[in-house]
Amino acid sequence: MTNVGRKLGVNIFTLMQNSGISREDLAEKLDYTYRDMCRILEGKLMLPPVEIGKIAELFGMTKKELLSYEADKFVPELQYMKEFSKTDNLEMILDLLDDYVELKEVM
């Protein structure tokens, strides 16, 4: 499930860059805090389908198109994720990285 959130966040971020919309602007349009918008883009805040639909609408697409958008080609840093043959290992590593980042933010 975490991977779905990350992919959604990358898709939204890519669409924001292509449209020239900032995090602040998107957060304001969707009535989110800046922090929540960052968490959405990082895949740390899961959204209900209704909210995903609102975001998709802002970019002129359907919810299904937003979820299946192929942003990976625009975000080369994610290419390493495709090298894992066992998705359980990928999820575990990404969760550990998330925990590390959260700890660093608290310090």
Image (cartoon, grey):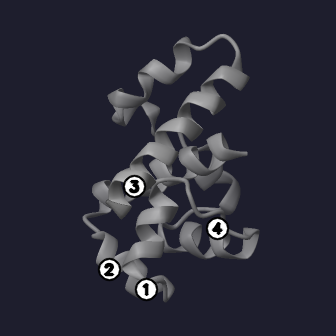
* Residue occupying the point 37% across, 63% down: 106
Disc 3 vs disc 4: Cβ atoms closer than 8 Å?
Answer: no
Residue flagged by tag 1: what amino acid is it? Lys
Disc 1 vs disc 3: Cβ atoms closer than 8 Å?
Answer: no
Q: CA distance from mark 1 to mark 4?
A: 13 Å
Disc 3 element: helix
Circle number at residue 13? 3
Of the numbered discs 1 and 4, the one sitting upstream in the chain is 1
Of the numbered discs 4 and 2, the one sitting upstream in the chain is 2
The residue that label 1 is drawn on is 29
Q: CA distance from mark 2 to mark 1?
A: 6 Å
Mark 4 Cα-neighbour bin, 10 Å: few <14, some 14–19, many ≥20: some
Disc 2 vs disc 1: Cβ atoms closer than 8 Å?
Answer: yes
* Residue occupying the point 29% across, 69% down: 21
**Viewed as shown, does residue 48 lie left or right of 34?**
right
Circle number at residue 25? 2
Residue flagged by tag 4: what amino acid is it? Ile
Of the numbered discs 2 and 3, the one sitting upstream in the chain is 3
Above/below status of 65 relative to 106 = above
Circle number at residue 52? 4
Residue flagged by tag 2: what amino acid is it? Asp
Splitting the image into 4 quarters, where does residue 53 fall?
bottom right
* Residue occupying the point 43% across, 22% down: 79
Check the image and name the residue furthest to the front. Answer: 107
* Residue occupying the point 57% across, 66% down: 56
**Quadrant where the image shows the N terminus:** top right
